[in-house]
Image: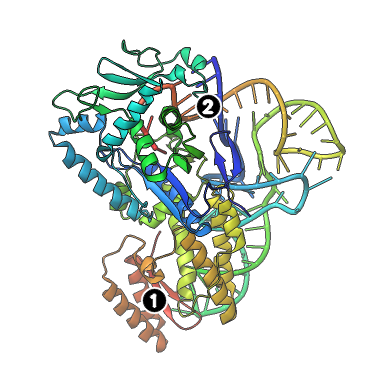
Amino acid sequence: MPLFLHNTLGQKKQEFVPLDPGHVRMYVCGPTVYDRAHIGNGRAVVAFDVLYRLLRRLYPKVIYIRNITDVDDKINAAAKERQEPIQAITERTTRWYHEDMGALLALAPDAEPRATEHVGEMIAMIAVLIDKGNAYAAQGHVLFDVPSMKDYGALSRRSVDDMVVGARVDVAPYKKSPFDFVLWKPSTPDLPGWDSPWGRGRPGWHIECSAMAKKYLGVTFDIHGGGQDLVFPHHENELAQSRCCHGAEMARYWLHNGFLQIDSEKMSKSLGNFVTINDLLAEGIPGEAIRLALMSAQYRQPMDFSREGLRQARATLDRLYTALRQTADVNAGDDDVPLDVLAALEDDLNTPLALSHLHELATALNKAATQAEKAKAKGALLASGHLLGLLAADPEVWLRGSAKKGGLSEAEVDNLVRARAEARKTKNFTEADRVKAQLKAAGVEIEDAPDGKTRWRWSSK
RNA sequence: GGCCGGGUGGCAGAGUGGCUAUGCAGGGGACUGCAAAUCCCCGUACGUCGGUUCAAUUCCGGCCCCGGCCUCCA
């Protein structure tokens, strides 16, 4: 089954046909580095990480670019407010971002270009746009001339006419049309700035992605992704700039993930109702559980973030890792990812359906009677998990470390488990139960397997 | 106001014109010294009003409700 992806441009699922099957190219909008990433940001990263992993499986070479926006008015404001150098903020936040996304088990992109390192490319693009009559300089600014592009608005399905009514646009005196947007703006001496043909200034928000995507991926590339809120104006404007500058389409497939909601309301920095990834990690919630929770709804659907969702994600991982632990002595077969798992992902990244198949594989593994059956099911489960960026941990480590620990060290638990085993051997069940109760009070669950082995785990309840 | 999503069993969440996922929670059973884990069985859901159809949760239309974008935001 071929890969189908929902294209915002045209609003329908389409078969994905890369420009060059030998070299698939994807660009995803990355963070503006001034604050910790929240789990909504994490959702986007996880969604495109799943796509990246799937593409790498389907094609021999995939290049994935995710930018870092390190010049922005919000960064300037944060620096002023905190009395801190801009670079200190951007570097620290970038480091945090890498840590948080690593905890979510997201693969690093092939490159993470920084805006500040590509101002030259941006200036060159702006100059071309002026030459071609799609941009104009005015009072130290350079603006994109929206009416110069006939079908502006195609991506976000809005026309300039629609926007006139009730539009809240920034009407500045230097704009020819109220919808024109800034490519370049002047900087005061206390703000970051670069010399340009239009004076010392800094780039507008959208131009960096156009310039960097062109540099790393070429004029036209396969996939451009980001959150739904980037459709307008960010991606609409990128598309406009790039196409007018290069005379060719920017990207062929535009993908947008849906929002995470809290109490049925969008989670966002401006609303202040966000939870950072770091907050959750600090509470002891494993990154893999957060990742799974984010994959439990299809990426385009609205999704409510909840503690219950995290609890369920953790329960799911406990179940899958338990099945793997019970068969720790079985060598996984080299079974490939089953077709139904692959088919689910190839249908616009239907991760919940794919996960349901992982559950079926776990059931098959639990039920398997022969070594051959176990090896087959285990191989299929691991291969599927790995494709989704899951199940890479040692099951023993996961089960012993997935929950909040009680007052006992692992060695103490091991000793008590051994003491209980001794008591059971002599049929001293009173003593055995006393030890078990003691362990339970410390948050340790005992499991006497049919094979005679006793295993334990930190209770997740 | 314009444009765009969504309303599925107690919860999460897929999906389909007739065969009604998957998991969590709940009930029953098997197994177990007791448990836990595991396995088996069970509860029969698709906002609302109409239409099309032999048959609609699934297609079409109206309505209601929730959310998003139109301003920085994944």
Q: Secondary structure at mark 2?
A: loop
Image quarter for residue A337? bottom right
Q: Amino acid at mark 1?
A: Asp
Instruction: Out of A224 and B30, give the one closest to the viewer.
Output: A224
Locate residue A129, reporting x and y percent: 38, 25
Instruction: Determine which residue is flagged by label 1.
Output: A433
**On the rendered structure, is A386 left or right of A113?**
right
Is there any visible trace of residue A271 in the rendered image?
Answer: no
In-image side of A13 versus A209 (left or right): right
- Circle 2 packing at 10 Å, graded few (<14), some (14-19), many (20+), is some
* Crowd rating for badge 1 (residues with CA inside 10 Å; few <14, some 14–19, many 20+): some
Which mark is on residue A154? 2
N-term-proximal mark, 2 vs 1: 2
At x 39% / y 14%, what residue is drawn?
A: A178
Q: Residue furthest bottom?
A: A426
Q: Secondary structure at mark 1?
A: helix
Q: Residue furthest front?
A: A131
In the image, A34 versus A69, the foreground residue is A69
Q: Is residue A383 above or below residue A223?
A: below
Q: How many marks?
A: 2
Residue at screen point 40% across, 52% down: A290
Question: What quarter of the picture does the N terminus of chain A occupy?
Answer: bottom right
Residue A277, how many percent across, how many down?
33, 47
Instruction: Evaluate whether residue A409 shows in this view.
Output: yes
Q: Position of residue B4 (x, y in %)?
A: 56, 29
Establish if B35 lies above or below A165. Answer: below
